[in-house]
Amino acid sequence: MHARTSPAASPRLIRNHLGAALAAALALSLAGCQATGDVAPSQSQATQAPAKNQAVGTDATADVRSRNDAPADAAAAAEPAAKAEARPEAERANLGATTLAKPAGSVEAKSVASAPAYYATPREQSLDRIEVTGSRIAPTYAKRMAMPAAVAAAAPGFLAPPPPPPAPPYSQPANTEKYAQREDNPVQRTREQPLSTFSIDVDTGSYTNVRRMLNDGLRPPADAVRAEEFINYFDYGHAAPTSLATPFKVSTELAPAPWNAQRQLLMIGIKGYEVPKKNLPPANLVFLIDTSGSMNSPDKLPLLKSAFSMLAKQLRPQDRISIVVYAGSAGLVLPPTPGDRQEEILAALDRLQAGGSTNGGDGIRLAYATARQAYVKNGVNRVILATDGDFNVGTVDNNALETMVADQRKSGVALTTLGFGSGNYNDELSEKLADVGDGNHAYIDTLQEARKVLVEEMGSTLMTIARDVKIQIEFNPAQVAEYRLIGYENRLLKREDFANDKVDAGDIGAGHEVTALYELTPVGSSATRLPALRYANEAASSGGGNEIANLKLRYKRPGEDRSVLIETPVQRSSLRVVASEPMRMAASVAAFADALRGASQYDGWGWEQIAATARGLKQADPTGQRAEFVRLVERAKAQIGELKPNSGVAISE
């Protein structure tokens, strides 16, 4: 016998069912009102506390699986399981296959494999796992998003959840490139400071890095411009020594400055002995390659692999090459391998892929250990570090890394750094590590530059012929009122460091050429920049009447600890009427560097004068470097505009 419900009782039954539905919806909504950052508990938590539905969210990535919660209220608990089984099969299948869309990259939900056999809350039917990937999320929003639309619509009075917010527009990551801050060398009054002492520098990375920026339409930061690296990028044809017994030759030239005839330029040239490739000693090279995620860019790891492949093809059977990589940790990819096993070397390079964080400290330690293991006595032992310099795990402090490299150089293994890429390039660290590692720093922006550094200049890049090379010039106050060293700001030494053989300085490689420029103001010139001193003794010096200056140079032969001294006086009679073409080219490059830094030093010399000086030279340009330089000047003019020289002049304190 079946009980029948009278028509009069129908409204009450309807109200009861409606009240139960509203209570269930309200309980579900209240269950979502947790503190910001709460997420559904894990399976283990559900086992321990089945009546509890709360977990504290964290910033770390977590996987949180749903559980069989207790019914939201008594009315929902009383609903017979048979009603759930009575649902149409298609409806239950749709509930079981429901997937929650991933809102704004924060929460990822995966569909349930099959629908439960009993009626469960909508949240349980739609979610199998929630992955919290990042900062905390709003739990109420996530739980509402978990309810299938069909169930939400069936619940009387339940408001549909808002659609997920649109994905944020793509934006280029912030530029985090790092450059050491510095100031241009000041004008010095000779009578107060007659000595100028500095370490030579053979780096060229600043020029090619700035070239990359200009070609990309970017204004280079002032601190990215180092005048000495601009100047040393070019070949000026300095006289070379005739034998390795004298590893290099020093030459000087004195001529009027092209931007002001009342001043003079003194050019110092050092040329290393050119060792034929066949006569280079055996090389023990360790390629230390950054394979972190930041290197995943066409101008980074792919270009790096092509560059190192060029060098690998130049190796001989007596050479040894190893490959160490680092990302989150460091690893040995290729143990010391003879240079004639090129297929094996190239295959190891080709397999490299980028990913992970950047533990450069571990990579440096492993690279030096590998180099020491394969050490070649009286040979070339060098680590070549290729990176964008973005060290972010492990040893990340610049000072600690520099100390590590400085300690390792005592083992006789030098360090060369090659910079790659843009956006996060750490020029400051790459240049400093090369300085303290008895090596050189270059920046690779094209395959042509890779060929120049690693193929054409392989001898000078790898083989050191003179160590700790220092220059000290004593200017004659009877002839020179003022002087200014162009560039080398981060290579300046104390006067007492010149004769101290324990003080580290720059090295010269086989065939390497180094150029330095001084701007001089002769005594009696109207172009002096510093005001006269009221109480200074203006009595003329009686010594060295014909000498402008005395040039002293110290260097060590490889493997020796005592330095050798060379002295070369600069005579006033050597003054040329017109500067040579190499000096005019060097002057235009120096002025270009100053223009990019703010145009404060060269008496209004602008883009047109810089380009015209280089364009007017008659010397051959077989590599096209001078033509490229002129194009860069024209690009700089178009991007920066007319120069507005800084009226202030740096003055020595």
Image (tube, grey):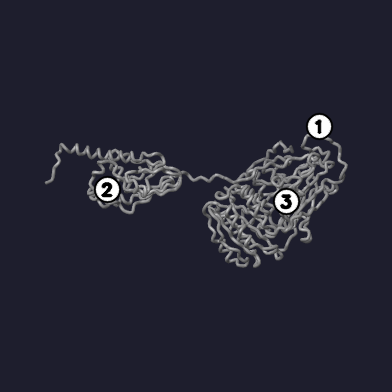
| Crowd around label 1: few <14 · some 14–19 · many ≥20 (10 Å) | few
Q: Residue furthest front?
A: 48
The spot of residue 277 in percent (x, y) is 70, 64
Amino acid carrying label 2: it is Tyr
Amino acid carrying label 3: it is Lys
SS class, disc 1? loop
Lateral position of residue 216 relative to residue 235, left or right:
left
Front residue of this view, candidates 533 and 407:
407
Lateral position of residue 35 relative to residue 396, left or right:
left
Please say whether residue 309 is visible from this viewpoint: yes
The spot of residue 540 in percent (x, y) is 86, 39
Q: Earlier in the sequence, mark 3 or mark 1?
A: 3
In the rendered image, which residue does mark 2 sit on? 119
Which of discs 3 and 2 lies nearer the camera? The answer is 3
Label 2 to label 1: alpha-carbon separation:
100 Å
The spot of residue 55 in percent (x, y) is 39, 44
In the rendered image, which residue does mark 1 sit on? 534
Please say whether residue 616 is visible from this viewpoint: no
Amino acid carrying label 1: it is Arg
In the rendered image, which residue does mark 3 sit on? 502
Label 3 to label 2: alpha-carbon separation:
83 Å
